[in-house]
Image (spheres, grey):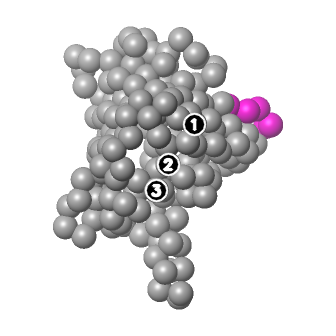
Amino acid sequence: MTDRPLVIEVPPGEPAVVFRRLVDASPDLMFAVWTEPEHLRHWWGPRQFELVVCESDPRTGGRYRFVQRAPDGQEHTFHGVYREVDRPHRLVRTFVYAGSPADESVETVTFQREGAGTLITSQSVFPSFAAREFYAKAGMDAGLRESHDRLDEWLQAIETNRRQA
């Protein structure tokens, strides 16, 4: 598990959220972990939510769809389209929460090699400041942090399995 913090920035002059994080994994692995259902199932979203649908077609024009089930049974659907796929360096995709479909954001994620690890940088640009605030108030910060804790656990499990093979 890495002890490198997740840094989240909310630029005051633009309707965006940026996060950065250095992880102990290669860009190739991080790209796969970010786009392939067999990885996403293990880390995407808060721990108390079950990821009941996890579909991803990481190619330009491909779609993804995630459905999380809350402990109370309520389901939350997220979906989008991959606009740009430059494996293993960069992804650009739309991001829509079905509960607020007019607030489609565009997320650009880069995976840059840094030493033996990868610097992940993500910028989500929202259609308005109100849309950004909706996501912030819905628990974006806590959800991102918990997802990254789970990401660390999954990377550790991958490394443990690799060593045992």
Residue under the point 63% across and 43% down: 55
Q: Tell me the distance, in whole angstroms, between the alpha carbons under discs 3 and 1.
A: 14 Å
Q: Tell me the distance, in whole angstroms, between the alpha carbons under discs 2 and 3.
A: 5 Å
Position of residue 84 in the picture relative to residue 68 (left or right): left
Which sits earlier in the primary sequence, circle 3 or circle 1?
A: 3
Labels 1 and 2 touching (C-beta < 8 A): yes
Q: Amino acid at mark 1?
A: Tyr
- Residue corresponding to mark 2: 35
Q: Amino acid at mark 2?
A: Thr
**Predominant SS along the magenta part:** loop
Question: In the image, is residue 145 above or below residue 70?
Answer: below
Residue under the point 40% across and 25% down: 106
Question: In the image, is residue 29 above or below residue 111?
Answer: below
Disc number placed over residue 8 in the picture, else none: none
**Which residues are drawn in magenta?**
72-76
Position of residue 148 in the picture relative to residue 28 (left or right): right
- Residue corresponding to mark 3: 32
Mark 1 Cα shell of 10 Å, populated few (<14), some (14-19), many (≥20): many
In the image, is residue 73 part of the stretch drawn in magenta?
A: yes
Query: Would you say residue 133 is visible in this rendering?
Result: no
- Residue corresponding to mark 1: 64
